[in-house]
Amino acid sequence: MKAQEAIRINKRRLPWWAVLIIVIVALGGGVAGGYALSYQQAQQSVLKTSVPKELAPVIAAYETVTNNYYKSVNTTKLTDGAIKGMLATLDDPYSVYLQNNDKTNLDDTISASFGGIGATVQQNHDSLSIASILPDTPAKKAGMQVGDVLLKVNGKDVSKQTVSKAVAKIRGKIGTTVSVTVKRGSKQATFSMKRQKITVDTVTGQLASANKQVGVITISTFSEPTVKQFKATVKKLRKEGAKSFVLDLRQNPGGMMSAALSISSMFSKNGQTVLQVEDRNGAKEVYKAGKKLDDGFKVTEKTAVLIDGNSASASEITAAALHQNSNIPLVGEKSFGKGTVQNVGEMGSNKELKLTIAKWLTPNGTWINHKGLTPDIKVDYPAAAKITLINATQLKPGDKGSDVKSLQQMLTALKVGSVTVNSQYDDATQAAVKTFQQANKLDATGTADQDTLATLAQKLSAQLTKDDPMMKAAVDAVAK
């Protein structure tokens, strides 16, 4: 999984000349045929507009292509390509030019919200259906129900599409209208709904099953509502009896730096450094714990932090600050190691430039880039958690390969039958699959169809959640 950025939100437009160069380039190819603008002419044009002279070759190349290429050229694609090409030379996966859906996806991630109807969609054996409906949402008000089979969105068939593609069609700009056609029993119904802002829960919390005095708080990503949701979760768990906490940052790819700073400040004494940001000239901006960051809300209970190889960026900012400022132990596996900061600059209504502008350092000045944070209490994931996902929609006797191996590993982890992991769908594998199907009230054919594979994945996930050695170690650490 690729780490997400520690984004320092500052959505202003880029420097005027950076936008102007696009305008100049866009206006440059007005004459069909003729001769390309020479480098000298391009340089003079650049100097007259105060655009950096280094961009003269870009304009000259643009003019050459638009005026002389043997076919008509899409000038927007040319300028977009030029920008992407510049960023590619940086060899930095976090500096990217975002357009259309990519821009929207980043914006949705940052805000942890999107324009939608408030219904979740799930994949069934051969159809899509409504899995859940949030209260006080367009879907609820319109009368949609859990179990409705999804047929069409805005009159277009989505019944055979993937969940992600169907959901992408349902989502859209807040305030716009979408029509969704479903099948309920033998009847069809079409609901016309106005999309509203749907906010995602980035923070969840519950008391640990093994110790009801330990509150487990999971942060999935650091977004705009995360700080508010975190405070509410801490207060709720305190009322339920939590005397200590486990902060679960596993699989958290990062997000907004400001959210990480606020939560880090909650666990630090006022005046303690929670983060240092260093620009390319070596100048440092130091962030210190205090009311400005945490609004006076503090967490002083005994705490442990769970991390793994996919805990990155803003997750690592938080984990490092808690560890170095408050001696809070890190439990699990070494973190990802992503120590840079990005800013987002707007380049139009559907375009953004996300650029790495600095590196961040832990409170004691350490740069963890490509190194990660080493846990105090090292606990590996169980072997079953590392089983490769099955890509096939069906596996049957006689099949061979990596998907069959994963199937056998899942059956072994769930202690179903007597299977040898040999990557061959043999008689023992067929018998184990049939046993599993019978136990879970599925068609006992011995063939692992889509329903069987989905149920296997659900059962294994539930077992891994129940038998979580990392969580057990973290709970033990705060219960002492």
Image: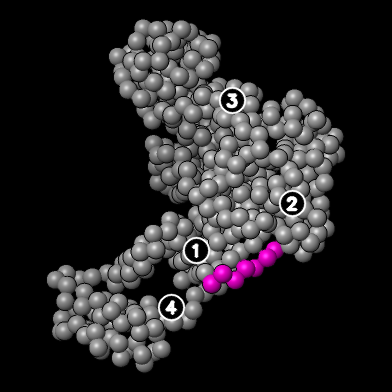
Q: Which residue, given by chain and number where applicable, does mark 1 sit on?
A: 356
Position in image of residue 98 (x %, y %): 44, 61
Contact check, label 1 and label 3, Cβ < 8 Å: no
Report the number of numbered marks: 4
In this rendering, would 235 be left or right of 3?
A: right
Residue 464 — which label? Answer: 3
Spatial CA span between label 3 and label 4: 51 Å
Spatial CA span between label 1 and label 3: 37 Å
Q: Which residues are magenta?
A: 281-287
Nearer the N terminus, badge 1 or badge 2?
2
Contact check, label 1 and label 2, Cβ < 8 Å: no
Name above or below for residue 415 compared with residue 364: above
Contact check, label 3 and label 4, Cβ < 8 Å: no
Instruction: Assign a secondary structure to mark 1.
Output: strand
Nearer the N terminus, badge 1 or badge 4?
4
Residue 278 visible to an observer of this rendering = yes
Spatial CA span between label 3 and label 2: 32 Å
Position in image of residue 375 (x %, y %): 63, 39
